[in-house]
Image (cartoon, rainbow, N blue to C red):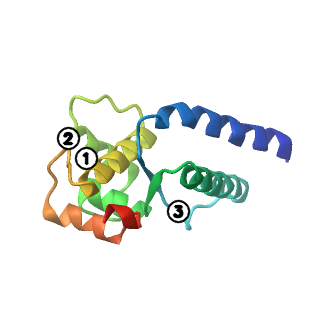
Amino acid sequence: ADYELRAARMNRIMQELAPLLRGHHLVVMEGPAYGVKGAVGVFDRAGLWWDAYRKLRKGGFLVGVVPPTLLKRYATGKGNANKTGVVAAVTRLCPDIEIADDNQADALILRLMGLHQLGTPAVRVPKSHTTALDGCAWPARMQ
């Protein structure tokens, strides 16, 4: 295991994230997926997740955290939907946006959830989907 290489990768990810945040005050992150297998990758992602969370908060951002099951419920109505189901739901919700993969679909759903929580929903989803917002960790200043 090359720890320096993995640390450098995490630093690069954080540097690439910074310009994307300019002009925004809320960042919505997907919460940890505790059931994921693959010890090294899980370990690295956990470190990166906490590093990003701490730096965002220190930078003055409001940070919302959405558990993976609630991301899926907002998108599809089912907390146990698979990746293909989430991509299909995103494609239906936002037909004008090209989605390259399930990571982009997840990111778009997180954005939509943040906008909805801010009171400016960008898409219409059934009430059964919006109940997912209730179980997320939203910053106190938003509520």
Quick check: 61 left or right of 73?
Answer: right
Amino acid beneath label 1: Ala
Q: Residue 102's mark?
A: none
Dividing the picture into quarters, in which one does residue 140 lie? Answer: bottom left
How far apart in space, not on screen, are marks 3 and 1 (Cα)? 21 Å
- Choose top left, top right, bottom left or bottom right for residue 93: top left
- Is 47 on the left-hand or right-hand side of 62? right
Which residue is drawn at the image coordinates 16% and 54% (left, top)? Answer: 125
Of residues 26 and 28, the one nearer the viewer is: 26
Q: State yes or no: discs 2 and 1 in contact (Cβ < 8 Å).
A: yes
**Proximity of marks 3 and 1: CB atoms separated by less than 8 Å:** no
Q: Is residue 67 visible?
A: yes
Q: Residue at x 22, y 62 (%)?
A: 130
Residue bearing the label numbered 2: 92
Please identify the quarter of the rendering in which residue 46 is found.
Answer: bottom right
Residue underneath mark 1: 89
